[in-house]
Image: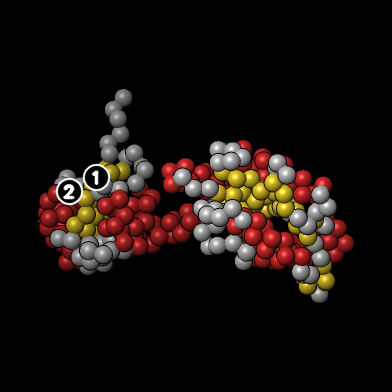
Amino acid sequence: MTAPKVQRILVIGAGRGGTAMLELFNEDPLINVVGIVDVDPLAPALAIAKKLNILNFTDLAEAVEASRPCLAFNLTGDDGITDYVEAQLGSGNIIGGFQARFIWNLLTRLKRTNEQITELAHHDSLTGLPNRILFYDRLNQSIARARREEESIAVLYLDLDGFKLVNDTFGHDVGDALLCEASRRIRDCVRVSDTVARMGGDEFTVILCNVRTANSKDRVAKKIIDAISHPFMLNGKDCSVSVSIGIALYPDNGETAEQLVKIADAAMYLAKHSGRNCYRFVDN
C-alpha cells in the first residue's frame, strides 16, 4: 500500500491566518509547512515559525525558490502576488483571492474554537479558575522549575467551613455566588505568578511559587483566612463561612504533585479537627 503523500505548503502573509495555519497544521503528519513569508519581519507568525524551525522570509522570490515544489497559500489579498506565484509554480499550485480569504476565515474560526475548547477543558465553568487538570499541569511545571532552580514551593489545600449550611439554607444560587466571591478573595491574597484552582465543590488549592522566606506561606494562609472570614452579602442574603487550610512544602514534604496534594489535604483535615478557621502543616 502506497504511503499518503505529504503536502508541502508555503504560507504567504503571516497575519492571523498565517498564525492559525502554523498552529493547526504543525502536528499534521500529512502537511509540511516548509516556509512562511511576510514583508513585516516582526509579523507574529514569523516568530512562531522560528520556534518550530520553519523557514521564514521577508522576500517573496526567495521564499518561492527555497520552498518549491509546494502549494502556496496567498493570505495577503493581493492578486498581483497570486499572479507572480502562479507564474513561478504553475496555476494548480497557488490558492489566492476568494479561496484564500475563505480558508483564512475558516482557520481563524477554527483557532478561536480550539482556544475556547481549551479554555473550557482547563477552567472551572463557575468561577473561571483553573480546574483540577490545569492545576496538576501547573504544579508539575512548578516542581520542575523549583528542582532546577533549587527553590521551594508551597501547596495550600482549602475547604470552606460552613458552605453546605449556606447552600442548603439559601439555595444553590447563593451557594454559587459564594464560591465565586470566595475565589475572588483568594486570588486577591496571592501574587499573579501563583495559581489558585478549584478542585471541586467548595475545595480550592493554591500553588505558591518560589517561597523565599520561612513565614511567607504562613502570611498568605493568614491573609486568606482573614479575607474569607468577612461576611458575604449575596443576592440580598448575609452569609458567613470560614476556611480550613492545609499546607505542604516542596521538597520537604514530597517531591511529586500527588504527594504534595495528598499531604496538603491531610493537613487540611488536621485544621478541620483543630477547630476550623485555621491552617496546619501535616507534622503539626
Q: Which mark is residue 8?
A: 1
What percent of the width, then of the height, locates residue 173? 77, 64
**Mark 1 and mark 2 residues within 8 Å of each other at the beta carbon:** yes
Residue 116 point in image, percent of width and height: 52, 57
Across and down, in percent, residue 255 comes to 55, 38
If you read the primary sequence from the N terminus, does the residue marked by circle 1 or circle 2 appear first? 1
Residue at 37% x, 52% y is 23
Secondary structure type for disc 2:
helix
Placement of the C terminus among the 4 image quadrants: top right
Q: Along the horizontal axis of the image, is 184 left or right of 111?
A: right
Tell me which residue sits at (29%, 57%) in the image: 47
Quadrant location of the N terminus in the rendered image:
top left
Note whether 130 is above or below 148 in the view shown.
below
Circle 2 sits on which residue?
Answer: 67
- Disc 1 to disc 2, how far (Cα)? 8 Å
Name which residue type carries label 1. Answer: Arg
